[in-house]
Image (tube, coloured by chain):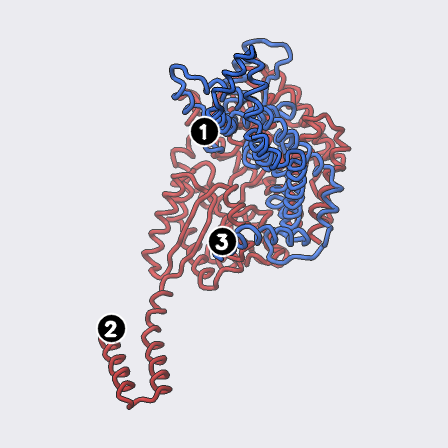
Chain colours: A blue, B red
Amino acid sequence: MPSVLLVLAFTLFPVGYNVWLGFYAKHSLRATSTWVGLGNYAQMLGDPDFWRSAWLATVYAVGSTTLQILAGVAGALILHRRFVGCDFLRGVALFPYMIPTVIAVFVWRWLMNDLYGVIPYVLGTLHIPGMPEAWLTHATIMWVLIVLSVWTFFPFVLVNVLARLQTIPPELYDAARVDGASAVRQFFHVTLPQLRNVLLIVLLLRGIWMFTKFDVPWLLGFGGGAGEAIRTLPVFTYQRSFTYYQAGMGAALSNIMLALLLMAVTIYFIAFPPAEEEQDA
Amino acid sequence: MGRRDTAGLQRLVTERKEGTLGRREFLTTLAAGAAVVAAPRRATAQKKIAVTMWDTEPNPATRAAVKAIVEDFHKLHKDIEIRAEGMGWGDMDRKLQAAMAAKSPPTASHTQSYVVTSFRAKGLIEPVDDVVKAIGEDKIFPSVLRWLKYPDGKYWGITHAWGAEIFGGRGDYLPGTGVNPQSWRTWDDLLRDLPKLNKPPQYYALTLAGIPFFVNEDVYMWAGANGGSVFDAKGQPALESPQIIGMLEFWKKLKPFLPPGWSSHDYLETLSAWATGKAASVLMWGRTAGYIDQYAPPDKRNPDVFQVWPKTIGPMGKAPLTQFDNEPWVIYADAPADEKAAAKEFLKFFFKPENYRRYCDSVPVHLLSIFKADFKDPSYLNHPERKRWKPWLDAQLKWVEIGRAHPLLVSNPEDVLIPWIGDVAASPILADMVMAVVERGRDPKVAAKEASDKIVRDIIGKAK
């Protein structure tokens, strides 16, 4: 019974309230609201800014999740080997994930600042043709956002993959070597199949988290100026609720995000059914 | 419960046990006794009226000044507890939204002039005429008071302190350039000389903030300096007017003289860029003196290096316009009556000369006194910081005296009455319009129409 109450209070009620609110026009500062039915949804679906934000959120989620997985797997493969200082490096690798987001983003803002930042300065000294003078601009801020997010969140992938790597029976590699498999073939035919399940879970979780990520794009771009180019769906939703003061519209947008994620998760589970995964394992 | 009360209760219980007191009489007597015993306790609990006051001056010097004033107030009003909390604007916006939505606002807070219009229209605040009259209506700058007196004849807020935005320029960058900023009158004059002040990557001729709130500031000031306004006489967006299109064209022409990453810079970054020599000019406030003392070389921390340059007008404008930092205290209608009365009592105390001076002196060149007499009072003017930055002080005073310092988004005085002005200021619509033109090369007329449509659909349409 207590667990049912907890689920009702902390999960179903907020979601239900949000769904209900999405049918109303409600100013964030007023307690009154007006029923508009599907009006909020109709307006949003006809708004080019909504579609642009959805596209930016997709670019960010796909780009950063893909690179996090590549960096996390590469890092895990390196740290899986025993070498002097590997325990220390395993600890250090977690640091970006342990730093509070607000600090990580502001440090990156300073590093990338066109007037004082060390990164534009160093890149400028290389005199590479076509290298931007500034990175926190409309043209390039999405790249900064993706790189910053990969740096911050890849340790999550690394830890999960490393944990799985350490449970792969060494006999599998011994057998592969006896069969004459090169290191590359061992990776594709032994390591990768063994990592499949953990990678699928990591892909699902990180994909959802990056699609709904608010703090990093908001703190990097504040929703405007150059930040307009990283106005992802969560940022757009926040602005509707808290800068346009349209609580009903903000709720409708959250519901759209929830629906999009449920669709993505459904497609994911159809493509990778859990039972099949267990058999593979 | 005192000993006498306990004895009475014991006697009551004994009589009931002995059957000399009926059940109904026992309960009635017990309830009456409990009420008598509880009454003084309730009175004790209500003794202190807790007043929550949020302000937007979180810097340590101002906090210390406010704390001292509150402590002195507590000595005189032992029945009132003032809970003064300072926070940044961003925090204030979010805290206020949450508090208002929950119908649990603070008793009083700082806010922006345009928010007063919005809150007044929604019935969220109440007039403070009694405070203004107690302070002395005739003692306050008329150009400070005018923005908070509405057509109903009532004052809906009282400015805590004022400041006017000034155009700052580096005097040490002028020698050898042939530039004399004091001769500037028009945008063309400025554009003619900016190339001579632009030495990238060492420094750029001008720095502007790209975060929406600060872009909004430049939009309405330059619109006003070009003879236009963000809104027409009916409160509808006037973004497709020649004055606004001219303003957007002007902005495009400024871009080559801005740092390449200007669109991501916030306001404080522009101040530090000017203080450290990365920008030759900046739109700034008196508060910037603190940045100069923090970042500029010691031998340059003076108004000969950090000069005031004139603001210019557009081809369709008659007079330049500057931003007026005229943030008022407002009293929230939903707060309990005794708290509102106590808050007003505190404000009357706060504005007493001996208290108010401490507050203004905490940021001497930015938190300027609302009292006219202070600007003739040697004890106010001879504060070391005010003496040191006298040209800055004089420039701000001049803006107020000529009445061309207007609150945010108020290009024309009547704009302050537009109910959705606060919603437009809070949204990123105007900043998106500027970015579309300056950073993404969009035709100004197209960008202006898009922004105009958004204001009509997303803000005015929702307000109906």
Give percent across and percent down for residue B295: 43, 24
- Give the labeled residue for mark 1: B291
Mark 3 lies on a secondary structure that is helix
Tell us which disc is closer to us: 2 or 3: 3
Answer left or right for A60 relative to B82.
right
Q: Amino acid at mark 2?
A: Gly
Q: Amino acid at mark 1?
A: Tyr
- Dot 2, crowdedness within 10 Å: few (<14), some or many (≥20)? few
Sequence-earlier tag: 1 or 2: 2
Which sits in the foreground, A118 or A265? A265
Q: CA distance from mark 1 to mark 2?
A: 61 Å
- Dot 1, crowdedness within 10 Å: few (<14), some or many (≥20)? some
At 33% from the left and 69% from the top, the residue drawn is B41
Mark 1 lies on a secondary structure that is helix
The chain under label 2 reads: B
- Give the labeled residue for mark 3: A3
Answer left or right for A245 relative to B71.
right
Q: Quadrant of the C terminus of chain B?
A: bottom right
